[in-house]
Amino acid sequence: MNDSVDHRLRGSWTPEGASAVELAPKAVRWLTQRIGECTANAPVAPNSAMPVAPSRIPGAAHGKLAGIVGEEYVLDDPAERLARSGGLSYLDLLRRRYPSSPPAVPDAVVLPADPAQVQRVLDVCVEHDIGVVPFGGGTSVVGGVTALRGGKGSVLVLDLERLDRLVSVDPVSRVAVLQAGVRGPDAERLLSVHGLTLGHVPQSFERATIGGFAATRSAGQASSGYGRFEEMVTGLRLATPRGEWRLGVAPASAAGPDLRQLAIGSEGTLGVITEVAVRVRPLPERERFEAFALDGWERGTRAVRHLAQRGLLADVTRLSDVGETASTLALAGSWKTALLRRYLNARGIAEPCLLILGWYGDAVHRRREAVRSLRAAGAAGLGTAPGHAWLRNRFAGPRQRDALLDLGVCVETLETAARWGDLGPLYERVRAALHGALDRPLVLCHVSHAYETGASLYFTVLAARDEADPIGQWERAKRAASEAIAGDVPATISHHHAIGTDHAPYLAAEIGDLGVDVLKAAKSALDPTGILNPGKLLPPHPR
């Protein structure tokens, strides 16, 4: 067995040529003063320490799959299977450090080359009743790519990395068609040749794929300007157990319910997305990132609400709460930070909340009005340096998490969204739930997406890892937070992380039992034998 540790399992999203993050001693001291001392005794386990059962793919099915994609693209080596054994949640990564609680490992990995091969692979899986887990960048943090069997004798991962083409560009209509396996940076590179951009940049951008963006209803950091991903999608091509399904022929339609929106967010349970037609825009000629500080979370969220309801949001709008702002300033720790604190005190800002704004292209008029609104709300301008510092480091979170895991820290994120009138109570309920479930946690939060009617809340949680029960520690905390979200304050269980396995128990509370029945009916129509992504979004299909 190959004893190397695959980068996908470690959680490192380091771009080619970049180095992994090392925590500065001052950062470690600052953190342990707040959460307590941590025990760093759980390194990433080598592949040889992970239990991997022999493949259960029937020999006849293996031969047919090899005949479709080529023998070299049907992988049953344990290292290859381990490399697609889960996503990048805290628990996914933790299971690579504790072999006694190993991940669910698929029986094989199949890499088709084009949409036609994807359909033929599904046909074989229907014939042999093999579960199929579609796999793009593997960045799910809610169990969306866990290789569950769902009652099947075997399960394979359908890795779409070879579907990496820009199929077509229509510059007149500003529509491009991309294959599902194209990763975020490659999509921008392919489109930039034509002077265009998709403008979809979530934190998973470095690894996540076009198909994954669609399958999970992704929201990029510039959603206030470019929109959420479902707003960008104009058409879809899917492979299903019933045959190929194509959706979207016009910019708008009244021909019944929009079935594109049924496929978007379906997490591979209704079909395997193979191509996505997306709205694109000209590359912006300029950009500006800047920062402001507002006094207190309530005043900060009120200022962002005013911007949203007046149509003045920046393309990127991110408001950190007092705790997240304090951690940012503490970890910066330079003489400039001390000057900044004195400046804010002089402006009467006792509990600063950092607001990052990013503007693309010709947004001069909107920016001017937005700054006036912020100044009227008592915001202090901090210039462009903090904004561009955030821009440089916006993808560092996963690499910082690797270092924190090495240190012995329980570190994870969760998110939700609510209407403005409910946002304050929701914020307090989730924080209280996390503080009640963990010992001395550091709970940080920011608004990452804002709308006329409400906003998202994105929480980061850090605590000293419980070495006696590290998995149960986070499962209890996540359950407490999820129950708070699904409680009396109206909120969504997921704004952009999707449902997967983690959030499935809370879906009915949001869409109702009748809504669950509607999804089950769609599942039954498209996937009658329940082979597609068993156990995700909905329970396994009954036989």
Image (tube, rainbow, N blue to C red):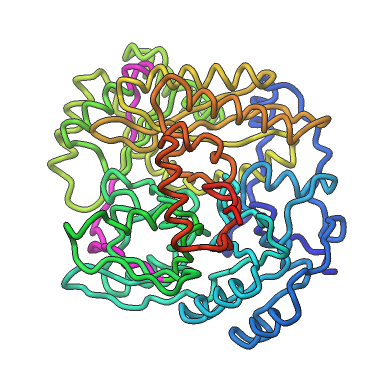
The x, y position of residue 183, in whole percent, is 47, 65
Considering the image in quadrants, where does the N terminus appear?
bottom right
Compared across the picture, whether 18 is left or right of 50 comes to: left
The x, y position of residue 139, in whole percent, is 56, 53
Q: Residue furthest left?
A: 365
Residue 518 vs residue 227, the one in the foreground: 518
Residue at position x 33%, y 47% in the image: 222
The x, y position of residue 357, in whole percent, is 31, 38
Q: How many marks?
A: 0
Residue 269 vs residue 225, the one in the foreground: 269
152 falls in the magenta region: no
Considering the image in quadrants, where does the C terminus appear?
bottom right
Which quadrant would residue 375 be assigned to in this image?
Answer: top left
Residue at position x 76%, y 50% in the image: 96
Compared across the picture, whether 387 is left or right of 531 comes to: left
295 falls in the magenta region: yes
Which quadrant would residue 390 be assigned to in this image?
Answer: top left
277 is higher (above) or lower (below) than 257: below
The x, y position of residue 462, in whole percent, is 63, 29
Residue at position x 64%, y 52% in the image: 11
What range of the chain is rendered magenta? Answer: 275-300
Residue at position x 39%, y 47% in the image: 219
Compared across the picture, whether 70 is left or right of 380 comes to: right
10 is higher (above) or lower (below) than 6: above
